[in-house]
Amino acid sequence: MQYKGNSIVKEGKAVQLDDGVYWVGALDPDLRSFDIILNTANGTSYNSYLIEGSEGYALIDTVKAEFADDFFARLESVTDYSKIKAIVLNHLEPDHTGALPELLKRAPQARVYISQRAQSMLKALLKDSSENLEFQVVNTGEQISLGDCTLTFLSTPFLHWPDTQCTYLEEREILFSGDVFGCHFCDGRLFNDKVGDFRFSFDYYYAHIMRPFKKWVLEALDLIDPLDLRIIAPTHGPILRDRPRRYVNHYRELASNSLSGELGTNEKSMIVFYMSSYGNTARMAEAISVGAGSISGVRVSMFDLQGGETEPFVDLIEEADALILGSPTINGDAVKPIWDLLSSLIVVDLKGKVGAAFGSFGWSGEAVRMIEDRLRGLKLRVPQQGLRVKLIPNDEELEDCYNFGKDIASILIGKKKECKVLEFGEL
Amino acid sequence: MAKAKVSFDDIDLTVNVPVGTRVIEVSEKVGSGIIYGCRECDCGTCIMEVVEGWNNLSEPSVLEDKVLRENLAGRHQRLACQAQIIGDVTVKPV
Ligand SMILES: Cc1cc2nc3c(=O)[nH]c(=O)nc-3n(C[C@H](O)[C@H](O)[C@H](O)COP(=O)(O)O)c2cc1C
Ligand code: FES
Ligand SMILES: [Fe+2]
Ligand SMILES: [Fe+2]
């Protein structure tokens, strides 16, 4: 195991992190890929915490199923199962609930505390074994007492699943934050002032796991900001006991728009991306951009996907208000760079942005409809039916393109079209 | 066939639909900002605000009620993938 020499994690032993608070998690140094979407160059940890109160113990989260033995051994080094009064599930993902079914068997008297949105998920997770399971739903501000200490719950949904919440131990000023403030970084020295340099891992985790939920991150930070914080104890990676507030502030920076303020405050940003083999779709893109730019209050940027890297484009799209994609139809499909761009967008929140598609085609023209469907699937709204031109656009068709851009730009600035009534059959 | 009007407040557009049509069948086609996830009464992604005509939507099922509750829906909110239009109604994204 890595860092064996200076690791404070010993087999079968809990690590005390504060008065009456223990780490009973597991290290997974050999993991190289997490949830398919993340690389984990030095593995990860599954942090689970045990809190001792004068009237019993509370356990916060468990570990991945393969590590259940490590977890139970650490737990048993502090207490026996009959003294566990509460099991708090801050997040139901299997990396934190893997040991739960067995734990429920060993500590049947313990009450399970979950968030409002976790209810149906918990049932789906435990399937048949959940039939008689009693759990208690908790919301922001609700508390449970362990005698001489109190746990307060904070409802922080969508970080990064609907069920997520944080739990605060008031008397010790410790926030058990779930995946928030976590990272995949395996180091037996456990604490942020002792482990190796994990800055990259921290930002990488945010970028891939939390970034799509920016809006929810900011709401959670509003709940966390007023808390006195001595320690932040996340479910993965280092325990943040040295200046924990820095990480809260850093999350706020990460969740704030990097480019905001570049455009005028009342300006809307529209981005047009296209690919073109013979220049037909490119000509359409040009006319659409000019048309959109004729509406004041809309700033249009146009890019040929052939000349760019996907990642910076993703940053641009995150900040944009409208995303217009142009592709020719090649073998009955839109071209690969368009799909590559679209499949890279899972890391950003697209809800409510305006989307549209256009393109030149030869005989069947499937690309535009396919892109539109994908845009809807990504939760953009597609208010204007896509524009297709057969082969080379003539002046009249370029005029259509100009008006298409203009219409989308008008929608973007909220200029109301005259109130229309349509027939269902015509849609 | 009996008809009813569904209006989408966010895009100022009204559609005449056969009674019994679900909101989901119309809203995406016209580009309203109401969004969908599972499309089958499970995830709560499609929660929408009913601006007018609350009683002109089909009664929520037990399952819809449960999803609305779990997702902390407000007083005038319904699932757009479930609610059927039975009279004139105005809706918008939350
Ligand atoms: C990072 C991440 C994001 C997820 N996002 C979604 C989602 O948006 N919607 C959903 O229905 N499930 C989501 N899930 C849940 C997975 O689909 C679920 O855990 C599934 O059982 C995994 O299947 P597998 O074991 O075949 O990988 C997500 C899971 C992870 C790890
Ligand atoms: S889309 Fe999931 S409940 Fe309607
Ligand atoms: Fe997670
Ligand atoms: Fe996790």
Image (tube, coloured by chain):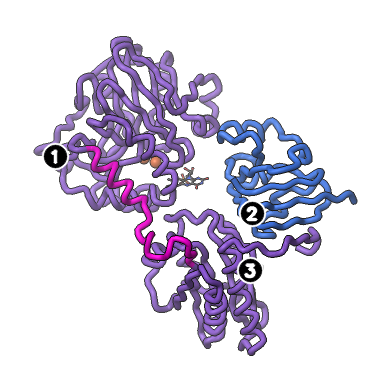
Question: Residue B82 location, x and y as percent?
Answer: 70, 42
> Was residue B68 drawn as part of the magenta stretch in this picture?
no
Kindly state the secondary structure of the residue where label 2 is placed.
loop
**Residue annotated with mark 3:** A369
Check chain identity for marks 3 and 2: say if they share one: no
Quadrant housing the N terminus of chain A: top left
Question: Residue A15 location, x and y as percent?
Answer: 20, 27
**Sequence-wise first label, 1 or 3:** 1
Callout 1: few (<14), some (14-19), or many (20+) C-alpha neighbours within 10 Å?
Answer: some
> Was residue A246 drawn as part of the magenta stretch in this picture?
yes
Q: Which sits in the foreground, A405 or A187?
A: A405
Q: Is residue A398 left or right of residue A161?
A: right
Q: Quadrant of residue A223?
A: top left
Quadrant housing the C terminus of chain A: bottom right
Q: Which chain is purple in the rendering?
A: A
Kindly report the distance in space between the C-alpha atoms of the residues bearing marks 3 and 2.
23 Å
* Residue at (40, 30) in percent of width and height: A154
Q: Is residue A248 above or below residue A393?
A: above
Q: Give the number of the mark in front: 1 or 2.
A: 2
Q: Which residues are magenta?
A: A244-269
Q: Which chain is blue in the rendering?
A: B
Q: What's the mark number on residue B10?
A: 2
Check chain identity for marks 1 and 3: say if they share one: yes
Q: What subunit carries mark 3?
A: A
Q: Quadrant of residue B45?
A: top right
- Amino acid type indicated by mark 3: Arg
Q: Which sits in the foreground, A219 or A153?
A: A219
